[in-house]
Image (cartoon, coloured by chain):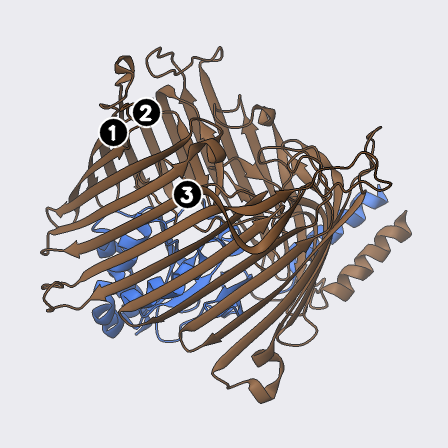
Amino acid sequence: MNRIIIVLFLIISFVYSYGQDTEKNNLPSVNIKTLNGETFNTAGIKNADGPIFLSFWATWCKPCIKELIAVDENYVDWQEETGFKVYAVSIDDSKSMNRVAPFVNGRGWEFEILLDPNGDFKRAMNVINVPHSFILDKNGKIVWQHNSYSPGDEDEIYEILKKLASEKK
Amino acid sequence: MNRFFLTIILCFHVLFPNISFSQNENKKDYGEIHGNFEINMQTYAEDSLTGAEAVDDIIRTNAYANITYVKGNFSAGIRYEAYLNTMLGFDQRYNGQGIANRYVTYKTDEIEITAGNFYEQFGNGLILRTYEDKTLGTDNALDGFRIKYMPVKGIRITGLIGKQKLYWEYGPGIVRGTDAEISVNETFKKFEDKKTRIIIGGSFVSKYQKNLDPVYNFPENVGAFAGRINLSRNSFILASEYAYKINDPSSDNGNIFKDGNALLINTSWSKKGIGILANVLRLDNMSFRSDRAASINDLNINYLPAVAKTHTYAFAAMYPFATQPNGQVGGNVEIFYNMKRGSLLGGKYGMNISLNYSQVNSIKTEKIIVDPDAEIPDLDGYTSDFFAIGDELYFRDFNIEIHKKISKKLKFSAIYMYEDYNKLVIQGKYGTLHADIGILDFTYKFNSKNALRIENEILITGKEPSGEKQDYGDWYMFTLEYTSSPHWFFAVSDQYNYGNPDTQHRNHYYIISGGYTKGANRIQLGYGKQREGVTCVGGVCRNVPASNGFSLTVSTTF
């Protein structure tokens, strides 16, 4: 009996107590990589100027590329209006990982590109398949997510970014 | 017993010093629960023309649920899986249901400890990669302990031990490994702001499996090591890894004692508007499993990435390359080019073009004849000249892709692909065949929400000396896909094997499907016939049998 009480006590104390960061980031802390192979902790996905568009993609995924092209086509306007930032996390594994840098630069995308070759961040975010996109507010809280892409989805993305940007003011 | 639990509480206080037992804080943090669900169902009806088979239980289900709990530095997760019964095309040893994966992790900036199941990759995975891929039905997770330690910024050390998952059981071998990586620029202040970035890493993996063979004296401990370097300057990147494996007789290599080795070189250069990449991979006797008798995709400790480009259009992916762990040498070159807006070919919206060539051959080998009178017989099997290329062609792919926006409403992609495919080596069927593939894919946007995609594909195989068409002959495919953003899609498609040399089997494989997506919730329903084929991810492949029936997929992330 004592044992059960102690275990319960332990669980309650564990659940009820610590952590009171008001600036808490909703993103899990996972070590992935930058394009030149350096380690990047996903807790560092931040944007002080506005919302974040976080997209899981791969060079072999057609709808993912269509989605990123749509965001890229509107990038300058949306950036000006909402101050948003794009993080595109490639889940290409070691087979196609080296395609990411020339692919992205060839298209002239001005996104923050990260590499998740063994799906560690993808798993931590419970992403099943790509494309899967998230929008985070400036406190790093996930406010929207969407799986798959159809032409026109960028309008919904834009609406949410705009809303978040106006809340900021 | 009480003392034991008090000790645990004490330990928790050391580990999580900011836990307090009072509740006087304004904001309570209960931690967070996240997860996902995915349910795939398929009915199976017989179709004598396509070879689709019925199943006694009519309907089959593969379903998964992941639940993760995160609170501060602590996280834990489980995955429940149910295969009732396993869908055709996946290993039937999955049949059943239960907790397939569970772990707890404690992580700070300095240290990370995981107990239970974990996925890990050393370097490019040449000597160790555990991963899961539901489309392949692959899950070689280790179950054991893993520690990651970062003593100073830029230096990472990983150590692990465990047994590998084999469907609902574990393989017989124990896997132990360690990896260390140093990022020179992050570690040494002197190089902090240098443009040239250097990362060096090395790893060692060893497996232990008891030898129960009455005849062979198999080594019980087999080691493999690898070294890697990643060099980059501005947009030039060179990443290379070399791996070496000590004698590892297995059913894969015919129980020879030869050492194995692998060399991978990836290099790329890019600037705005242009990107170029080249890679080379040579493998010699590099199959590495935690059971020397295992086959197909079971109990792989390492991952050998295919060098060829991954194609996603149905016909471009009809004859996919799969890595040949026993020996292959190959290379791949690709160029991406973005023609500017307003240029001659670029037109009003610019044009995107890419060229790719890859080729994979056998390695050059010389068989060792075993001398029965020798005191110590040479059981290496063969010798191989590292710098020579074998005569047998496994795979060749040249392709050109064009993506262009014509107007605000119309976009298209066009692809031509020239392929030579050694089906006998890669799939164990037929011989070598040639295929020419053409793809035209138009997307027309009616307005900001509604779009129609029209996809045409054609595949033409070469001819045998007898004049007969190779393999299944020629194919044509037509797809119509209507999307209404952000929720709906409907699609019809037909693959028509009009050029099958066996006129009885000039089949249509039609599929009708529709789906609804809301946020991260997705439901998709389909009906139709699936042709027999191969699904590949990263050079690892799975056979998909012909099927005929309804399919349903429901997935959600929360």
Chain letter for the blue part: A
In which chain is the residue bearing label 1?
A: B
Determine the secondary structure under disc 2.
loop
Q: Is residue B125 visible?
A: no
Front in this rendered view, residue B412 or B327: B327
What residue lies at 17% left-to-right and 47% top-to-bottom? B449
**Residue B181, how many percent across, how many down?**
64, 68
- Label 2 neighbour load within 10 Å: few <14, some 14-19, many 20+: some
Q: Are marks 3 and 2 on the same chain?
A: yes
Q: Are marks 1 and 2 on the same chain?
A: yes
Front in this rendered view, residue B6 or B373: B373
Nearer-N-terminus badge (3/1): 3
Q: Which residue is mark 2?
A: B472
What residue lies at 39% left-to-right and 16% top-to-bottom? B52
Front in this rendered view, residue B458 or A160: B458
Q: Residue furthest bottom?
A: B190
Q: Is residue B198 visible?
A: yes
The answer to which image quadrant residue B352 occupies is: bottom left
In which chain is the residue bearing label 2?
A: B
The answer to which image quadrant residue B82 occupies is: top right
Q: Which residue is mark 1?
A: B475
Front in this rendered view, residue A168 or B406: B406
Chain letter for the brown part: B
Nearer-N-terminus badge (3/2): 3
Could you tell me if the residues under marks 1 and 2 are in contact, i.e. CB atoms within 8 Å? yes
**Residue B503, how many percent across, how many down?**
25, 15
Q: Which residue is mark 3?
A: B395
What residue lies at 9% left-to-right and 56% top-to-bottom? B407
